[in-house]
Amino acid sequence: MYFPSSNRIMARCQACNSVVTKTDVVCYGCGDPIPVSHRRPLQPKRISKVSNIAFFCSLGLTAFSFLSQRKLPLSVSIGLSGLLLTVRIIADRIANKNPEPN
């Protein structure tokens, strides 16, 4: 039987082999309790403050481009958008590498 790679990495019930999520307390299929090691609270993906600032700058650039009478040259607009995207990607990677202490 063929299982896609995403299906193989999912947690399984020890009794009936059905898929269980990280927040399940009991198996949906057979009702057996799930071991504590499989019950972890979901951690939302961290979004850095720099990423939020880059998003709002990009939003402002878009609004300026659509609403202003003065238009930016295409090369400047593409360059600024690319720079903001690069800053956002780098900020997200740094935020995921260095989790904030609780």
Image (cartoon, grey):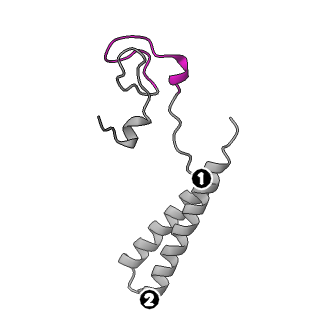
Horizontal relation, residue 102 to residue 84: left or right: right
Estimate the x, y position of residue 62 in percent, counting from the top left. 41, 72
Residue that mark 1 sits on: 48
Q: Which is more N-terminal, label 2 or label 1?
A: 1
The quadrant of the image that shows the N terminus is top left
Examine the image and state in which quarter residue 5 appears. Answer: top left
Start-end of magenta stretch = 23-40
Estimate the x, y position of residue 88 in percent, counting from the top left. 55, 62
How dense is the environment of label 2, judged by Cα within 10 Å: few (below 14), some, or many (20 and up)? few
Q: Going 51% across and 40% down the picture, which residue do you hit? A: 44
Give the main secondary structure, helix, strand or loop, of the magenta stretch. loop
Tag 2's secondary structure?
loop
The answer to whether residue 90 is seen in the rendering is yes
27 in the magenta segment = yes
Is residue 51 placed above or below 16 in the rendered structure? below
Q: Label 2 sits on what residue type?
A: Pro
Of the pair 85 and 62, the residue shown nearer to us: 85
The quadrant of the image that shows the C terminus is top right
* Residue 73, numbered circle: 2
7 in the magenta segment = no
Tag 1's secondary structure?
loop
